[in-house]
C-alpha cells in the first residue's frame, strides 16, 4: 500500500487551505508542502508542529487540499486521524488551530494535548 492509499490523517478547512496557499505562494518554492507532525513534549504530553518542508519521505502520508500538499509522518498520522486544521482571522487574533478528536486533554496554549 502506498502512502497515498491510507486514510487522510488531517483535514484542512477552506480557510486554512486558503491561508496556507497564500503562505506557500510567498515562499516561492513549488516543491514545498505543509508538514504537520506530533512530537513528544509540551505541557500535556504531545505538541503539534507545522512547517513547510520539501523533504518528503516515501512513507509519509500525503494529502492534497486545493493547491496545498500536506504531509504527515506515519507515527504522527495515527494521532491525527479525524483532526482538522482551521485558520481564524478575527478581532481576537489570527492563527491556526487543530481540532483533534483523539486528544483527551488539551492545555491552555492549544498547542499541546494528551
Image (cartoon, rainbow, N blue to C red):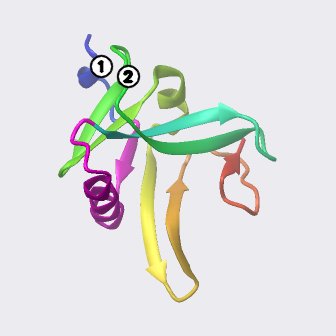
Work out whether 96 lies above or below 91: above
Residue 70 seen by the camera: yes
Q: Residue at x 47, y 29 (%)?
A: 77
Choose between 41 and 30: the one closer to the eye: 30
Circle 1 Cα neighbour tier, 10 Å, few/some/many (<14 / 14–19 / ≥20): some
Contact check, label 2 and label 1, Cβ < 8 Å = yes
User: Where is mark 1, residue-wise?
Assistant: 3
Image spot of residue 11 (x, y percent): 36, 48
Choose between 32 and 98: the one closer to the eye: 32
Q: For residue 42, which numbered disc appears in the image? A: none
Image spot of residue 22 (x, y percent): 28, 62
Query: Based on the displayed image, in which of its 4 quarters is residue 45 positioned?
Result: top right
User: Where is mark 2, residue-wise?
Assistant: 60
In the image, the segment drawn in magenta is: 9-31
**Disc 1 secondary structure class:** helix
**Disc 2 secondary structure class:** loop
Q: Residue at x 37, y 18 (%)?
A: 57
Image spot of residue 26 (x, y percent): 30, 58
**In the image, 36: left or right of 6?**
right
Q: Going by the picture, which residue comes out furthest to the left?
A: 66
The quarter of the image holding the C terminus is top right
Of circles 2 and 1, which is in front?
2
Amino acid at each position: 500500500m502506498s502512502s497515498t492509499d491510507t486514510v487522510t490523517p488531517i483535514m484542512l478547512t477552506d480557510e486554512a487551505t486558503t491561508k496556507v496557499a497564500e503562505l506557500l505562494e510567498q515562499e516561492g518554492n513549488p516543491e514545498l508542502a505543509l508538514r504537520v507532525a506530533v512530537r513528544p513534549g509540551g505541557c500535556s504530553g504531545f505538541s503539534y508542529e507545522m512547517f513547510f518542508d520539501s523533504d518528503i519521505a516515501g512513507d509519509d502520508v500525503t494529502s492534497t487540499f486545493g493547491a496545498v500538499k500536506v504531509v504527515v509522518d506515519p507515527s504522527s498520522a495515527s494521532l491525527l486521524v479525524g483532526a482538522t486544521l482551521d485558520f481564524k482571522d478575527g478581532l481576537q487574533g489570527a492563527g491556526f488551530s487543530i481540532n483533534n478528536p483523539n486528544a483527551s486533554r488539551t492545555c491552555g496554549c492549544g498547542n499541546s494535548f494528551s
